[in-house]
Every structure is written in C-alpha cells, then in structure tokens.
Amino acid sequence: MTVLTEPAQDAAATMPAATMDAARRAMIDSQLRPSGVNDAVVLAAFNRVRREDFVPASARAVAYMDRAVPLGGGRVLAPALSHGLMLMEAAPTLADHALLVDGGSGYLAALIEPLVGTLEAIAPGETPAGKDCSLLLIDGAIENLPDALAARLADGGRVVTGLIERGVTRLAAGRKAAGAVGFLTLGEADFAPLAAYALPAKWSF
C-alpha cells in the first residue's frame, strides 16, 4: 500500500482537469466496458460525474483506480465497477421513484439522479418517510433487508444491493411480490458492509 507524503498529497489535490478527464475515460474503457457495463446511458452518467469530487483531496490521484477508496469516518466509495454493475441490473427509468441508501460518498446519488423521475436518499439505518418507491438501491453490503425498507418498496418494485452470504459479498437483485422480497445473487462484488443492516451476532459455546 502506498502512503502519500505531504508533497504527494498536494500534487494529488491539484492534478489538472485534463488528467482527471483522461483517467475517467480510461476507467470507462478499461474497467466498465470489459466487465459488461456497456449501456450507453449508464456510461454517459459515469463520464458526466467527476469521481474525484467525491473523495478527499489527498485521494484524488487514486479516485479512478479499480478499488474502493476510504473516505474517513468508516465511509467508503465503492469501486466504479460495483456501481456500474448495480446500475446495469437496476435499469433505472424516468418512470421510477428511487430510494437510495447512501453509503456516505454521494457518488451513486449523483450517477442515478438524472436517470430516474425522482430520487430520495437516506443514510444507513435512517427510516424512510416518503412515498413508496419502484426502485431501491443500497450502496453497501447488507446481511438483512429491514422491514422498514421492504415496506417502502412498492409491489413489483426492484431492489439492488450488496448482500453478504456466509462472509462473501455479492451483488444481489430482488423484486417485491405478494408483500415479500426475494433475492437472486449475481456474483461477487466489492461493497463495504453496512453495520446498520447486519444480523444480530450469534453466541456460540
């Protein structure tokens, strides 16, 4: 792991816009497209949103690397590929009222807001108070979908999240039917666990 010295941090914070634009295009071409994120609308969103604006100044130099970026205070910006696969699976439309559980970066909210009709964002563990949503996105990994979130999902609504099963985090998609939400896991993904949605610890003797 590379530790940035003070001069390196200053350089990262003042990297030219052209350099960051080139890094953003390289992220799209070398990380997203080869991994199946190829929807033109989704890629346009990634090209539009400056990922470096959602990390500390000292981390701008690594904003476009294919890894999570720690933000401090336990918050994490997931790799772009994790968000890209999430948006591909979610297939947002302007007919959607979307509810986003924001993992703390604000990046996913910036990506999806122009792609849906309305967007409501809440913090992990916060009780949603608006109208029922047709699309629920959780920017992080959960062990359990709380009843309060499931209740806010309209019948037939979709949910896309990171899901922890047996210690492995996978991208998962679900749909609400007859008042219940079922999930289908889609493959391993890099999402930070959200403590607010962890299962109670089990005691063993």
Image (tube, grey):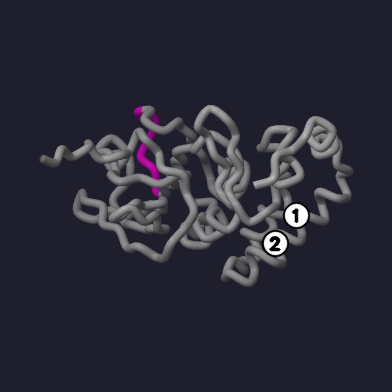
Q: Say if 32 sits above or below 83 in the image.
A: below
Q: Residues within 10 Å of mark 1 (few under 14, many from 20)?
A: many
Who is closer to the viewer here, 111 or 2? Answer: 2
Q: Do the residues under discs 2 and 1 have CB atoms within 8 angstroms?
A: yes
Q: Which residues are magenta?
A: 127-134
Q: Main secondary structure of the magenta part?
A: loop
Question: Which image quarter holds the C terminus?
Answer: top left
Who is closer to the viewer here, 59 or 112? Answer: 59
Three-letter residue code for mark 2 = Ile
Magenta span includes 33: no
Residue 72: mark in rendering? none
Q: Residue at x 89, y 43 (%)?
A: 16
**Relative horizontal placement of residue 183, taking residue 80 as reference (left or right):** left
Q: How many marks?
A: 2
Can residue 113 be seen in this snapshot? no
Q: Which residue is mark 1?
A: 24
Q: Residue at x 66, y 37 (%)?
A: 54
Indicate the secondary structure of the residue bearing disc 1: helix
Three-letter residue code for mark 1 = Arg
User: Picture coordinates of residue 20 (x, y %)?
Assistant: 81, 48
Residue 28: mark in rendering? 2
Q: Residue at x 26, y 52 (%)?
A: 181
